[in-house]
Image (spheres, rainbow, N blue to C red):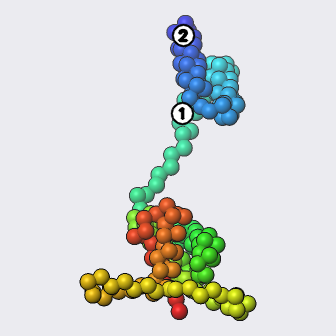
């Protein structure tokens, strides 16, 4: 009888020590929830000898037998691919909206966005864009600009990039800066 009381008191003391450790490790906003759970467990722990005496059942033993066991197969869960594809489509739609706003200053509209997936991680992005034709009112007020400058050194002809490839490069740089990605992981494809 005396050994049972000492065992019961030891359980309560160990529980309170572990509880105090948990209280010190948790953030302030979660302490009220922890106090609620700890209070319920402490009431059960204190009252367990009384429950055992009244009902003849050992509630601590029943509690330990009632543990929930969940077994997962190492393979894929049914519907996992469909869920991942759905999330990816939503993410592509959101990225399309973001990139449309981002590339509006370059007179480019985003037609399609596609992410490169490698080992279930987004590794890069392909963006299909279309040039937005200027409005008629803007054509009248349009300023003259030089789009190509050719400088030949040692009479070697260098490949001159046209305005569309410059716009694609600037778009790649803006997308890389916006998503904090390496520019080599971004493709901008201009559709005609």
In the image, what residue occupies the spot 46% across and 63% down? 181
In the rendering, which numbered label is found on residue 109?
none
Residue furthest to the right in view is 137
Q: Which corner quadrant of the image does residue 111 belong to? A: bottom right
User: In the rendered image, which residue does mark 2 sit on?
Assistant: 6
Q: Earlier in the sequence, mark 1 or mark 2?
A: 2
Q: Is residue 79 above or below residue 133?
A: above
Which residue is the site of mark 1? 64
Query: Residue 145's image quarter?
Result: bottom right
Give above or below for 19 relative to 170: above
> Which residue does the image show at 26% across and 83% down from the upper left?
154
Question: Is 41 left or right of 121, judged from the image as shown?
Answer: right
- When asked about the image quadrant of residue 48, the answer is top right
Observer-nearest of 51 and 182: 182
Quick one: label 1, few (<14), some, or many (20+) residues within 10 Å? few
Above-or-below relation of 81 to 190: above
- Label 2 SS: helix
172 or 166, nearer to the observer: 166
From the viewer's perspective, is 83 left or right of 53? left
Q: Position of residue 8 (x, y in %)?
A: 57, 15
Quadrant in which the N terminus appears: top right
Residue placed at 40% from the left, 70% from the top? 184
Question: What residue is drawn where x is 60% and y is 71%?
Answer: 102
**Does the image show residue 187?**
yes
Left/right of residue 186 with respect to residue 18 in the rendered view: left
């Amino acid at each position: 009888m005396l050994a049972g009381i000492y065992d019961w008191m030891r359980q309560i003391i160990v529980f309170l020590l572990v509880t105090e450790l948990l209280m010190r490790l948790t953030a302030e906003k979660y302490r009220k929830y922890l106090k609620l759970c700890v209070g319920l467990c402490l009431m059960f722990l204190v009252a367990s000898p009384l429950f055992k005496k009244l009902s003849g059942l050992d509630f601590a033993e029943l509690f330990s037998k009632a543990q929930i066991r969940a077994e997962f197969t190492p393979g894929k869960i049914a519907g996992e691919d469909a869920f991942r594809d759905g999330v990816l489509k939503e993410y592509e739609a959101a990225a399309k909206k973001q990139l449309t706003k981002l590339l509006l200053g370059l007179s480019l509209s985003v037609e399609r966005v596609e992410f490169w997936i490698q080992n279930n991680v987004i590794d890069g992005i392909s963006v299909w864009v279309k040039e937005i034709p200027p409005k008629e009112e803007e054509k009248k007020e349009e300023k003259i600009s030089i789009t190509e400058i050719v400088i030949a050194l040692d009479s070697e002809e260098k490949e001159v990039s046209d305005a569309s490839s410059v716009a694609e490069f600037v778009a790649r740089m803006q997308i890389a800066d916006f998503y904090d990605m390496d520019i080599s992981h971004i493709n901008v494809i201009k559709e005609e």
